[in-house]
Amino acid sequence: MEAINSLIRTIKVFFTVSLFYCKLGFIYFARLRRKGSYNHSIVVLGDDHALGVGDYSTLTAGSGLAHKLGRELAKETSIRQSWQIWNRGEYKTCTEDWLHPADSKRKEKPTLLTKLFQDPKFLKAEIVIVMLGSNDALRKDPATTPQETVRNLELICQALKRTGNENKSIYLCTIPTAGDDTFLTEEQLADNLTRNRLIEAYCEKNADGVRPGLQIDLTSNFEMKRRNLYWQDGRHFSSTGYTKMAKDWVPMVRPDIVKREFALVRSALGM
């Protein structure tokens, strides 16, 4: 009996190790399929939702939108070059935490944006996705008004625009509102609705060249009402939710990506 149990354990270990190397091989060949030295990068920054809270991660795979979007772009036959996506989400951060020190009224100045601007991966990024603002409604002493949230987002986007790649695209998402009826007061619920209306108006105005990102709130996008899109707390996205977002992002950024790939080929050919 002991010999049989030992054999079963050996077989389990063999299949676990085999699966691990199969995953490594898949990642290697997926990257190899992208052509030559034509490399591009995307940065996803913001709060819990940018970080990927609610998703799972493994030794060979990250979590959240950054990981899921990279996988979806790899499937696209119209995208011929290499696109690396970097996760720069920070847990439980609010818009004030991401302000440039010069724009902050705090005595102790925030440092997240300063650190980001020292990151070579950001400096080379051609596309930046901003998912930020969901924690502003929970902030106290002092509270952050919807107008202050959107003003902070404007200042953050302006700072992102003038630092690093001059030709970068910035996409600003609406604030997820799943779970608000559980975690927020009636006044805070109304404030989040106002925040999203102001974000949409800001992107529509396009004064800073900021493009509308995904609408991931319940009011603007009825598809986000599916229960399986959210983690057990009902507020953060699940693996299914991040996968859906990644698939929804592909048609939104595909024209931008293809245009950039074509421009790089033209430049390489001296056209």
Image: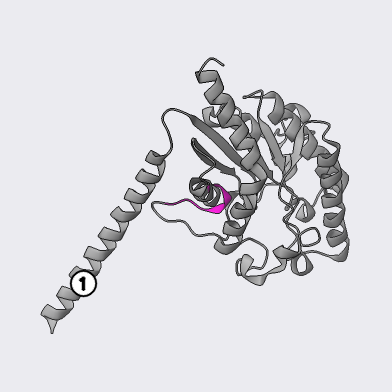
Q: Is residue 225 above or below residue 212?
A: below
Decide whether residue 48 is among the magenta residues. Answer: no
Residue at (15%, 74%) from the top-left corner? 7
Q: Position of residue 191 (x, y in %)?
A: 86, 55
Q: Position of residue 150 (x, y in %)?
A: 82, 42
**Image quarter of the N terminus:** bottom left
The residue beneath circle 1 is 9
Magenta span covers which residues? 61-66
In-front residue for pair 73/8:
73
Q: Secondary structure at mark 1?
A: helix
In-front residue for pair 88/205:
205
Specify the amino acid type for callout 1: Arg
Left or right of 147, for residue 214: left
Q: Quadrant of residue 138?
A: bottom right
Q: Residue furthest top?
A: 270
Residue at (66%, 25%) from the top-left corner? 167
Instruction: Decide: few, some or many residues near mark 1? Use Cα within 10 Å; few <14, some 14-19, many ≥20.
Output: few
Q: Position of residue 188 (x, y in %)?
A: 84, 59
**Image quarter of the C terminus:** top right
Left or right of 168, for residue 154: right
Q: Is residue 25 visible?
A: yes
Decide whether residue 65 is among the magenta residues. Answer: yes
Residue at (55%, 22%) from the top-left corner? 266
In-front residue for pair 5/24:
24
